[in-house]
Amino acid sequence: MPNALRRLLNWMRIPAPFVVGAWTVAAWLIFLQSASGFLSLFIAVPVSFLQMAILGLMLWLRPSVRISNEYRVDDAVWYLGTFVLWAVGAAVPAPWGGVVQVLAFVVGAIGIARIGRASQAENLANMQARAERIREHRADQAGGRAWGPDAGKVITIDTGVQWQEQPDDVKRGGPVVDAEIVDDVVKQDEGPADEWTARPRNE
């Protein structure tokens, strides 16, 4: 969709209901329509206002519109088509003006259903994608995937060195292995890191 049309739709969402309602009254005054046309204002003004407001709300409820101002071509067709039909119907004398306004109501009702269905489908897809990301995150945590600022760094553990820090410690020994840090560094003071949680690279 052209950027100009996207900006137009984005700008129209809030003022369009007020513009249609005000134009319906102004058109009756400008073109000096009949008394029956004046009575029709009590129906046409609130209906056109509500319909344009609902169309704008259905568009705003779609994440791609609300966040990125991304519209589809059929959004412009239904929204602008409804707006133009209400505006033309207000200016055309009776009885054809009433016919055009009824057509505007029908087009607007279809547009509300179509735009609302598209917004609902996009919201549902976003919820499913979010749920899938949560499941993957939990699966990664359950599988022992590396996390933390030092996660993924490779260290060499020399298990051939034997030590005994306290009398009740057991002496340990073994071959040198490569390991991957799977948890944050534990520091006892301001000096170098004292302890990591790691796993052998081949596991």
Image: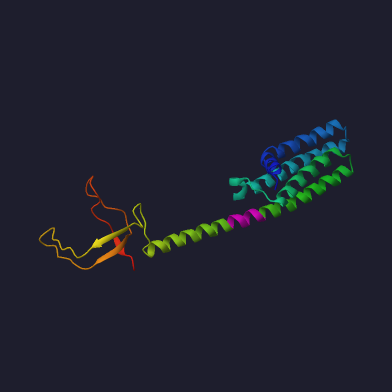
Magenta includes 134?
no
Residue at the (75%, 49%) spot, across then down: 77
Depth check, front residue: 183 or 38: 183
**Which part of the image, by quadrant, shows the C terminus?**
bottom left
Q: Position of residue 57 (x, y in %)?
A: 65, 46
Q: Position of residue 19 (x, y in %)?
A: 74, 36
Q: How many marks?
A: 0
In the visual, does 20 lie left or right of 33?
left
Residue 48: name its quadrant.
top right
- Relative to residue 158, is residue 113 depicted above or below? above
User: Which residues make up the magenta segment?
Assistant: 117-124
Residue at the (83%, 34%) spot, across then down: 27
Depth check, front residue: 134 or 32: 134
In the visual, does 32 lie left or right of 108?
right
Residue lying farthest to the left in this orientation: 167
Q: Position of residue 166 (x, y in %)?
A: 12, 58
Depth check, front residue: 56 or 43: 56
Dominant SS in magenta: helix
Residue at the (69%, 47%) spot, across then down: 55
Depth check, front residue: 178 or 102: 178
Magenta includes 123?
yes
Q: Position of residue 185 (x, y in %)?
A: 29, 53
Residue at the (36%, 59%) spot, across then down: 146
Residue 30: name its quadrant.
top right
